[in-house]
Image (cartoon, rainbow, N blue to C red):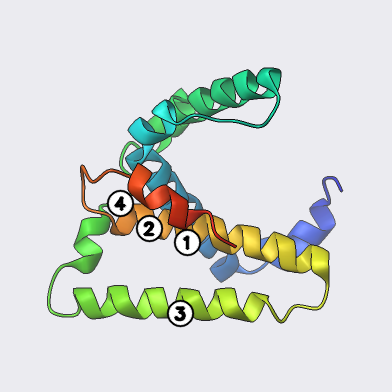
Amino acid sequence: WGKNPELMYDRVLRYQDRVRNLYFTFLFVLRAVTKATDYLEQAEYDTGNHEDDLKTVSLMKQLLYNPKLQAACPLPFDEAKLWQGQSGPELKQQIQEQFRNISALMDCVGCEKCRLWGKLQVLGLGTALKILFSVEGQNHAAQSVSCFTL
């Protein structure tokens, strides 16, 4: 594992739609992290190793209060606008169903390493969706158990 600029160019950078999708995914996850900042800051991180726990808390604070990320996009987008209007609830339901389908398809991947990485990526995006679907002020801790199921 390591940097591979040629592969990055061949698989992503030469396709503008993939680059746009990558930026959108970044903003999408960044918005979810921003929305869950209070919960993520107060969460208990237990890795089984006290030193790693402290390092995890430090890394989370660096992520949550990174001035470059905050300056780059103070509010990447207002997800509430996505669910407004007549088609809002229908769109929300459709996205949830498609996400469940993608997650189920990941079970069919033959390579265990690929399946694991794919499921982790889907889990991360699914967790971001749950956070963005939640009502402002709703306790994210109540949702956290369901977010971490593979």
Q: Quadrant of the C terminus?
A: bottom right
Q: Which residue is mark 2?
A: 130
Density class for disc 1 (Cα within 10 Å; few <14, some 14-19, many ≥20) is: some
Q: Is residue 128 above or below residue 67?
A: below
Front residue of 31 and 108: 108
Separation of residues labelled 2 and 4 (CA atoms): 16 Å
What residue did someone put label 4 on? 77
Secondary structure beneath label 2: helix
The answer to which of marks 4 and 3 sits earlier in the sequence is 4
Residue nearest the observer in this picture, 83 or 117: 117
Residue for point 29% across, 73% down: 92
Q: Residues within 10 Å of mark 3 (few under 14, many from 20)?
A: few
Crowding at mark 2 (Cα within 10 Å: few <14, some 14-19, many 20+): some
The residues bearing labels 1 and 3 have C-alpha atoms spaced at a distance of 11 Å
Mark 1 and mark 3 lie on one chain; the one further toward the N terminus is 3
The residue sitting at 77% across, 66% down in the picture is: 114
Instruction: Say whether disc 3 or disc 2 marks the residue closer to the N-terminus.
Output: 3
Question: Residue at label 1?
Answer: 126
Type of the residue with mark 1: Gly
The part of the image, by quadrant, that contains residue 42 is top left
Q: CA distance from mark 3 to mark 2?
A: 14 Å
Q: How many marks?
A: 4
Could you tell me which residue is drawn at 52 percent across and 23 percent down?
Answer: 62
Q: Which is in the foreground here, disc 4 or disc 3?
A: 3
Are the residues at dot 4 and dot 1 in contact (C-beta closer than 8 Å)?
no
Q: Name the foreground residue: 114 vs 147.
A: 147
Residue annotated with mark 3? 98
Per the model, the C-alpha gap separating discs 4 and 3 is 22 Å
Residue type at mark 2 is Lys
- x and y percent of residue 81 in the render? 20, 61
Q: Earlier in the sequence, mark 2 or mark 4?
A: 4
Element type at marker 1? helix
